[in-house]
Image (cartoon, rainbow, N blue to C red):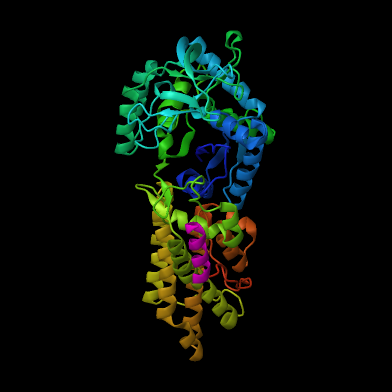
Amino acid sequence: MSKILITAALPYANGAIHFGHLAGAYLPADCYARFQRLMGHDVCFICGSDEYGVAIAMSAELAGRTPQEHVDCFHAVNKKLFQKMQIDFDHYSRTTWPGHVQTTVALFNDLLKNGYIEERESERLYCEQDGKFYADRYVVGTCPSCSFPSARGDECTSCGASYEAEDLKNPTTKIGNKPLTLKKTVHWYLRLDLFKDKLLAWLKTKSWKPNVVNFIKKYIQDLRPRAITRDMKWGIPVPLPEAKGKVLYVWFDAPIGYISATREWAECIGEPDRWKSYWLDPSTKLIQFIGKDNIPFHAVVFPAMLMGQNTPYKLVDELPANEFYNLAGRQFSKSDGWYVDLDQFLQKFSSDQLRYTIASNAPETQDSEFTWKDFQLRCNADLSGKFGNFVHRTLVFAKNTCQSTVPPMSPLQEADQLFLDQIKKLAEATREAYGQFRLRKACQSFMELAQAGNVYFDMKKPWQDAKKEEWGSVHTTIACCLHCIKTLALLAYPVIPTASASIIRQLGLEEPYLRRTWEEQMAYCLPTGHLLGQPEPLFRKIEDEQIALEEASLKK
């Protein structure tokens, strides 16, 4: 049994999660965690809210509430949405819990003692009217590259250039449009440049995708010291007496949240030192699910921070980084009104329907997108037409002709044996796909099995055999189909857990059955005479009228 620590990127507590977030990190991580638990491994699946930073302080100010009130709101919102989507974390933490502060301060102190943090004087944007420094998210000005007059403090929305806020021309405060000037101040810098050789040597041990490795190599070559402090109140105070009024920059403290969240999980289960068995054990497999825009922090910055520690923290083994998941050809954007409210969506449709739609078109190697028409097609053609139809027709037929019991299996005909062989083959293909982070392939494989069940049922025509009272053939057909259904419940469980649990109930099995390992479930045979449950449709069809309403709402 292997020990597997799975983390999903900490969502920023500045708004509700959307489909793009689910596709980028949370659904792939959840499916993988469910799969590895089925494989019998010791899995710990960790996440939590990222709650500090300039953007949160600014949003809270605009909303007329304190930063703590702001993050309390969105921590609760996102925690509830994850639960509704059945993202089954072992623990969902937050970076404002006291244990995170302690963990972050400890990491800062080790880096400082080991010579990886240094104090530097630099010029930052200062507002004379307010008597304080302003960080990039609070600043607007003229782009130094294209002269766009309303460029953001860190990036130009017109030409895409990135820069330091101090490079802006005619900088002013975002709120109030007050003029800003450069003023000297002291900050603390992480000497990322000192980790180049260690990072490159470590990277050679990884068998990651070539495009990811090449991107990381280039990023490492350009490493420079980076400021890890800010002049503001909202954040973890820099633990130095001479740093009064300064806090740690959010990109420094956020990844440490993976460690502190695991510590909190250990405390919650009454085993305070249990976190060490994951983070301090080199045999642990650490897998971090992120979106592609988070690659530099997880493949370079956070590993460098851990390399600078006296505590031997585990470094990431696998970094499944998905591409972007868009909405009808454009990026999700709440400010532009181009989004689908997840909470409202789940009042009309099921989490399984969305989980399957995203998983079966996951942006694993290139960007993909959600459209309402595609959602309807996947739900109606795949979930209802293939998967749900096969399960329901078999169980209804078994109820009507076999008194809702598992019939005996007579000597197999060639078609029966071929079908049973196909079940084994597609089960193995699905297992391999999950293990290789290939959700799309896993969905294709178990949906292919559902369709194979429909083809077999139609070819065997058990209704005709029943009329002729050829009960041996009828019973063998239904027994084979029930075996297929039991296998489908296992294969689909990581993606559509509600439907799988429903199948288990309809097969007359108890809920604990789903906690059996993959091998145990594959080996289990429904005994002859076993009483089946009541057949129920797994999915409801989505009508054209519903889709037309949703498309009209989006266009508005």
The secondary structure that most of the magenta stretch takes on is helix
Provide residue 518's location: percent of width, then percent of height.
51, 53
* In the image, residue 545 lies in the stretch drawn in magenta: yes
Residue at image x 48%, y 62%? Answer: 551
Question: Is the residue 460 above or below the residue 150 in the image?
Answer: below
Q: Quadrant of residue 259?
A: top right
Left or right: where 158 falls relative to 135: left
Q: Does the magenta-highlighted stretch encompass residue 334?
A: no
Residue at left offset 67%, top offset 31%: 66
Q: Front-most of 462 and 108?
A: 108
Q: Residue at x 43, y 20 (%)?
A: 166
Q: Which residues are magenta?
A: 542-556
The residue positioned 48% from the left and 22% from the top of the image is 306
Give the quarter of the image for residue 258: top right
Would residue 95 be visible to someone looking at this image? yes
- Give percent across and percent down for residue 351: 56, 57
Residue located farthest toward the top when viewing the structure as drawn: 242
Query: Does residue 482 lie above or below 282 as drawn?
Result: below
User: Horizontal and vertical percent for residue 358?
Assistant: 46, 54
Q: Nearer the viewer, residue 16 or 467?
A: 16
Tally of numbered tags: 0
Q: Is 494 placed above or below 174 here?
A: below
Q: Is residue 126 above or below residue 159?
A: above
Q: Is residue 291 left or right of residue 401?
A: left
Can residue 281 be spotted in the picture? no
Locate residue 16, reporting x and y percent: 57, 44
Furthest residue in direction bottom, as rendered: 468
